[in-house]
Amino acid sequence: MEVPYIANYKLVVQIIGVLSTMNPKLMISSAEKIGNNQDLLAQILLRLPAKSLIKFKCVSKQWLSLISNPHFCLSHTRHQGHEGFLHPTALLLKVQYVLSPEFHVVPLKHFSQVPFFHYISTPYLNILQSCNGLFVCETDDDDNNVSEYFICNPTTKQFKKLSFLQNPIKDGEFYVSLAFDPLQSPHYKIIVVREVLKNSLIFELDIYASESDGWKVATTIFETKEGDCIEFEDSVFCNGKLHWNSYGNQSLYLDVEKECLQMMPMPTPLRGNRLEIYRYFGESGGRLYLAATCHAYIDLDLYVHQMASDYSHWFLKHRLNMGDAMEVFPELNLGCHPFSSGFSGVSFVGSERKEEVKVVIWADGKIICYDFNDGAWKMIHDPGLGLKIGTPIEYFNHLHEQRFIPYKYFESVYVFEDM
């Protein structure tokens, strides 16, 4: 066995402890015996968290080679799946419309020191989408008015700059999304929605496939209507399809494998004088969800919709009232600023039961959730007495004016093979 170039006693003890929980018959007496059995070592490492594997690369050259192997990395990612789905380790909260590599980390499973995006050298960074462990990011160069796009894995700090065959026209709409599910395939696709002519509402779809390391340009040409209000910057990948949010009555989704664009309905807006102001679009456990809040002086309602499995309609799953949450957590102060409800950053994550979901909400600097599993409000993350996530900054005069966008973070050792 190679002599490790860091002290590894505690690491080996941790691994042997994991081994003992697998099968008592596999208990061994020395770390050397583990190291000399490549298959056994791989089986042990597959059961360790991604963060531990990153540290264990320093144990020896043998371990570094094994943990860096793309096939092992894919197997490890798939081993983290539960009932056919990956579950996020944390949420990354970014203030809407503020370009910065900084964000707030909300742990969902255990505390995770998520690497910031400083390894992408830019002071202005915007997260566009997170998808099963990978992120799509945009950087802005104010001097040249040019955007650059990257995909990256924050756990491994690996990133790749995207190059397009068709660049955006000046002042034209240009949106970049990611389709990636390592439980189904080690490959990913980049989908670009590109406006053909400025203000024309005519778009083309360009698709990059990592498997072939090539682009297909203008695979689909389509036109939208002004009243559709499709938010191409707000995309959700679920069940092999890329969906776009919309504030209109209908939207679009792309069957990524067939490269076929389809229409889908959107929830019917509320009647009366209540104007919808925010729609939070997301997925969990293979289901699409949309939560809406209304424009009112003090509005504490959140309407949670779920898409039918056949895409025929949305049904109202529940009308949540944040006043009920304030009864459970009296320290929360919501709805105290005109037209700012005091909650945002809505995300959907899996619950203890596969068929149910948790609605995670930033509320007055705390992170709470409504768990449909037992119909109860719960505290997920409290930064501490007197502390709040989010503080008034130059763009806002009040904490509740901030709108947070949540991005799911999955600890993953996945590596790009198309670098």
Image (cartoon, grey):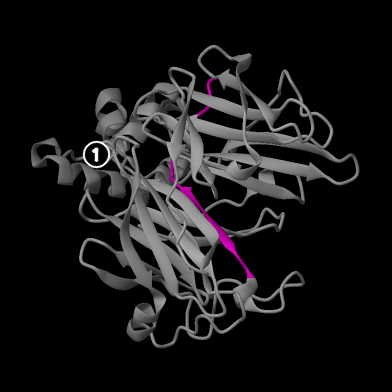
Q: In the image as oriented, which residue stretches furthest toward the bottom?
A: 330
Q: Which residues are magenta?
A: 402-419
Q: Is residue 405 magenta?
A: yes
Q: Can residue 9 be seen at all in this image of the molecule?
A: no
Q: Position of residue 234 (x, y in %)?
A: 56, 45
355 or 248: nearer the viewer: 248
Is residue 315 positioned above or below 392 on the image?
above
Q: In the image as oriented, which residue stretches furthest toward the left?
A: 25
Q: Residue at position x 34%, y 30% from top?
A: 183
Q: Which residue is mark 1?
A: 30
Q: Position of residue 303 (x, y in %)?
A: 40, 63
Quarter of the picture containing the N terminus is top left
| Label 1 environment density (alpha carbons within 10 Å; few <14, some 14–19, many ≥20) | few
Q: Please tell me whether mark 1 sits on a helix, a strand or a loop.
A: loop
Specify whether 203 is left or right of 46.
right
Specify whether 372 is left or right of 344.
left
Quarter of the picture containing the C terminus is top right
Q: Residue at position x 19%, y 40% from top?
A: 29
Q: Position of residue 292 (x, y in %)?
A: 46, 60
Q: Can residue 276 be seen at all in this image of the molecule?
A: yes
Q: Position of residue 182 (x, y in %)?
A: 39, 29
Q: Residue at position x 71%, y 24% from top?
A: 163
Q: Residue at position x 52%, y 45% from top?
A: 245
Is residue 381 positioned above or below 145 on the image?
below
Q: In the image as oriented, which residue stretches furthest toward the front?
A: 272
What is the number of callouts on the image?
1
Amino acid type, mark 1: Ser
Q: Is residue 298 magenta?
A: no
* Main SS, magenta residues: loop
Is residue 376 positioned above or below 234 on the image?
below
401 or 349: nearer the viewer: 401
